[in-house]
Image (cartoon, helix red, strand yellow):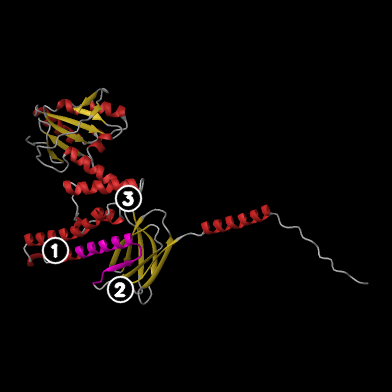
Amino acid sequence: YIIKYVPIKQKPMKITTIFKIFTFVFLTLIYVSCQKERTLTVSGEIPAAAGKMVYVDSITSSSPVCTDSAMADENGHFVLKRNAVKRMSFFRLRADSLYAFFCADSTENIDFKVGLRGELLLDGDEYASHVCNLSQHVRATNRYIRTLMQMGAKCPPQEIKQLIYARVMKYREMADSLVKANPVSPVSYYALNAKLIYNIEPYDFNDEEDYRLLAIVANRWDMVRPNNVYSNHLLAKLASREANKRVGDGLLFSEKATFVDLNLPNAKHNKVSLNSIKDKNVILLFWNLRKMDHEVLERIKSYYISNPDVEIYHVSFDKDVDAFDKVAAHYPWICVNDVEGKSAVTYNLEVTPSVFLFNKTGNFVGKNIPFIGYKF
């Protein structure tokens, strides 16, 4: 028999089928790539950290939180890997007695090394490098101030103060140049929030020039990074300063600061305005009435009765309105209740009790000083 080979004709694949296969493969590749987490790698070689732990702290507006750590080898080399951040964030590297702040956004590799003067240097994103460099200026300034303070009797106190002031101003020159060059950069945020040793704050936001700088940075950050934890922190700092300015917070015997009016309900639920009693010397007292000792209340009562030219505007923050009403009815001065606590924001209260003193012209003359026996 002769077997003849007859080739089988295959039908050509339809173009729509090819397109479906191509689309499936393409979408699969995209899905796989999306599932792969981007990582932030922090590495470096710090000889002083050889055989020791190296830590990375996450820095928000609150306290730092340690998020990563690794053991450096005998040469001080280390590698830490973590998921990349979705938004710009600040971090602090700690290695032995050295530390450096840096920021990370889209940056995936941060590498540290030690400079000629023992400072930490950073290779990576330019923004991160600027933050790191300024943090090393902070560290050097702290070391200088600590050395001066340890001199004690070897140097006159006034001379030490002058030297410290000069060094802080030197740091300010560096920080100012970076902030003014790019107010929206991460180093601007770091510069305005960094504190030196002994709680020295290089920027005084009661100073008009420093306040304007804060306002520029806060507003620029809010535009570029709205609802960011750092933007919100800057805005809160700005709002706090504005509240301080309204009431003359921290100023004694000022003829410029006047009070901000309050209008709160008393025990009879009638609203009493602070502005209505400004023809008298006014003691604005923030203290929950029901939490005060009986002896203290009696002393205030005796003082109030014997000083007819003084009015006390006593603000409580009592959620139990009925209980407040019963107690407040027993005292002759103005007792009002701020259930929502808005007056605490208006007067930028940090703690209670707090006291503000205003003279008959409405000028602020004192804060948180004993008012019993005070002569307006």
Label 1, label 3: how far apart the Cα atoms are: 33 Å
In-image side of 213 versus 221 (left or right): left
Decide: few, some or many residues near mark 2? Use Cα within 10 Å; few <14, some 14-19, many ≥20.
some
Q: Mark on residue 73?
A: none
In this rendering, the label closer to the viewer, 1 or 2? 2
| Residue 127 within the segment the image draws in magenta | yes
Mark 1 or mark 3, which has the lower sequence index? 1
Report if the CB atoms under discs 1 and 2 are less than 8 Å apart.
Answer: no
Q: Earlier in the sequence, mark 1 or mark 2?
A: 2
Q: Quadrant of the N terminus?
A: bottom right
Q: Residue furthest right?
A: 1
Left or right of residue 280, residue 343 in this image: right
Residue 288 x/y as whole percent = 25, 35
Most foreground residue, 347 or 318: 347
Residue 24: % across, % down: 62, 55
Q: Give me the C-alpha separation between circle 2 and circle 3.
A: 32 Å
Q: Which residue is mark 3?
A: 230
Query: Mark 3 or mark 2, which is nearer the start of the sequence?
Result: 2
* Residue 149: mark: 1
The answer to whether one can see residue 350 in this image is no
Helix, strand or loop status at disc 3: helix
Q: Is residue 98 magenta?
A: no
Q: Quadrant of residue 181?
A: bottom left
From the viewer's perspective, is the residue at label 1 or at label 3 nearer?
A: 3
Q: Which residue is mark 2?
A: 48
